[in-house]
Amino acid sequence: MKKTYLISLIAVFILILSSYSIFAQSSDKILLTENIKVSFVSQEPDPAEPGTFVDVRFKFENIGLETSDEITIELLPEFPFSLLPGKSAVTKLGTLHARQLGEDGVIVKYKLIVDKDAVEGINDLKLRYRIGNNVWIEPDEYEIQVQTHDAILSIDSIKISPERVKPGDKASLSVSINNLADSLLKDIRIKLNLDNSPLAAFGSSNRKTIKDISSGKEIEVKFDIISEPDAESDLYTIPIGIEYSDELGKAYNITGSFGIVVGSEPELYPVIDSTEIYNSEKTGDITVKFVNMGLTDIKFLNVNLKSSDKYKIISADEVYIGNIDSDDYETAEFKLFVKKTKEENIILPITYEYRDANNIEYKKQISLKLPLYSTAEAKKLGIVEGNGKVGIFLVIIIVVVGLYIYRRWKKGKKLISFGFRKKSR
């Protein structure tokens, strides 16, 4: 009976030891060999950033019932981790007392360099240790998290063709995006907010999606837009938003804005509207009409008539007109004395300056021809009328002279018929 009881007691003791050994070896990142437990405590910062430093800490505990021999630890860093220059990878831990657990465990710290070209995500770190002069023991690799401080996606440029969008016309818009992060960026979604503008996406949506962009790469995203036919000329601010995520699934978003100029170049045409001068050596007024035939209004119109040896400017040589609406006109008047000349026309060199609705400045020059005629040509063309009083006076003289001759002739005829002759002297 006593023998049976002793065998049963030994069996239970063996079972307890086996269970304890299995429990001690069941945890991830924990290895129990010769009663020493190694666990990864922390990394700081978490995640580590490429091109910076990271502190890693390990805890050594003795879960056994006896004091261990001296423990030697060696860190085995591989890319992207490395030790600081001059620092040893080997640490002498000393002995661990029996059941030296928890807060009594020994913390071992290493400061590592994280390479600037480190790949975002999980990077493995190895170490090994030995007890006394026994063989080296290498636990499973420990995971160190690496991530850039900010996965930066940059909007390098936004180009619009044409640079100025005419009302009712289409334009192409290109957005250049550059991945400045050291890792892949994915699920890139670009949105143009056109709500508060006279613009709309044409042929596609105002949203675009890009699957991914590799580190250091640049892509171009194109949108087709169209302006409303009755859009007012102006500079419109367009908000743009981009959402994306890194390889670890962290979401980012950036916002910004850019301007689109809606409008067209003014079509302003000056012409001589009327003149009081048709001959040389005459003084009169000349009216120049400025017609705005374009789609945009103009403002601050100023007109200057240049001097010439062909004429003398009697009035001011500069006239300020101001604003001219689309499909409208205004005039400028100048008083001139045209000097004696045999030329059929004289040239009026005019310089005019103005701004469009978007405040873009324009300065143009034009040479207007003022035709000159002889008096006879002017009368023939009906440009000028003859002198009516002189004409009537001439007619009267002709009539009087004619009557006088007629009466003299008739009187002489009567004298002959009565037998009288004029006595010769």
Image (cartoon, rainbow, N blue to C red):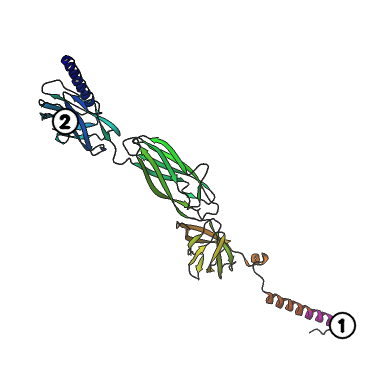
Q: Which residue bears the numbered disc 1?
A: 414
Q: Residues within 10 Å of mark 1 (few under 14, many from 20)?
A: few
Report x, y in % for residue 250: 34, 39
Q: Is residue 127 above or below residue 150?
A: above
Please give left or right for residue 2 compared with residue 177 in the image: left
Residue at the spot of label 2: 60
Determine the residue positioned at 54% across, 65% down: 331
Q: CA distance from mark 2 to mark 1?
A: 168 Å
Relative depth, front residue between 29 and 279: 29
Quarter of the rendering containing residue 98: top left
Residue 281 seen by the camera: no
360 or 75, which is in the foreground? 75
Residue 381: image x %, image y %? 66, 64
Q: Amino acid at mark 2?
A: Phe
Q: Looking at the picture, tell me which residue is in the foreground, 54 or 395.
A: 54
Residue 336 horizontal/vertical position (percent): 53, 69
Q: Quadrant of the C terminus?
A: bottom right
* Identity of the residue drawn at 51% across and 66% down: 311
SS majority, magenta? helix
Q: Secondary structure at mark 1?
A: helix
Query: What's the residue type where badge 1 is placed?
Result: Lys
Asked whether, in this view, residue 49 is left or right of residue 93, the answer is right
Q: Quadrant of the N terminus?
A: top left
Report if residue 101 lies within the magenta region: no
Span shown in magenta = 403-425
Q: Nearer the viewer, mark 2 or mark 1?
A: 2
The quarter holding residue 122 reads top left
